[in-house]
Amino acid sequence: MLTPSEFERAYLGTDDPRAQSGFHGSPERWEAARRPIVEAIDGPGTFLDVGCANGLLMESVHAWSDHEIEPYGLDFAPGLVDLARARLPQWADRIWLGDAATWTPPFRFDFVHVRIEIGPLDRARGFGRRLIVSADGSFRRPDSARLQPVAERLRELGLDVAGQVYRRSDEDRVEIAVAWVDR
């Protein structure tokens, strides 16, 4: 696993907000690769992005959702937390520095998003009512076939999957798998 300073070097070497969030590509590709996450949001409420980097997903989910969403973020890299707070001053007090493996949330969230490779899923599940897990990839990556079994991976952990989405955009050359578990 990468250290906070390795993430900072990788993400902070650019002014591109998508790259600062760990994604490389156009705004259209970003939306194609992230927008399906909002399909797991079934009503208004709080949304915690675990591994929020520069806060772009928080901002995007807030804009894309049909429901009123109050975004929050958690990241373990101090430089990324500082960037997210600077980018999103209206939510600066909602962006925390911490490691999901040891962090104690100040309250239970309605929706908690985590990428499957970030984890820890068992801890993140306790942060809120609905755990939303995603994985995405590019057709250029040979490992993108791993995306379809996100729900299967959750079931292997003994979790009851409440819903799932798989999208592939040939035009944008991206795909995303999302599954969610209710508490």
Image: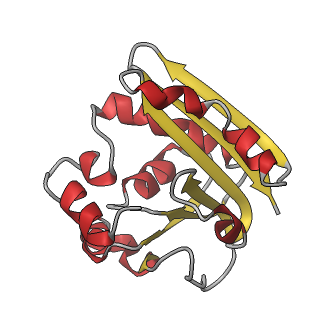
Q: Quadrant of residue 105?
A: bottom right
Q: Could you say where residue 95 lies in the image, as x and y percent from the top left?
A: 42, 75
Rendered image quadrant of residue 139: top left
Q: Residue at x 43, y 79 (%)?
A: 96
Q: Residue at x 50, y 50 (%)?
A: 61
Residue 119 on image: x %, y %: 57, 61
Where 14 sits versus 24, above or below? below
Which quadrant of the figure contains the N terminus? bottom left
Picture layout, residue 165 above or below residue 135: above
On screen, residue 27 versus residue 151, left or right, reads left
| Relative side of 2 to 174, left or right | left
**Considering only vertical position in the picture, is 109 above or below 163?**
below
The image quarter containing residue 24 is top left
Q: Which of the image's four quarters has the C terminus?
A: bottom right
* Relative height, residue 76 to residue 39 (above, below): below
Query: Closer to the camera, 2 or 93?
Result: 2
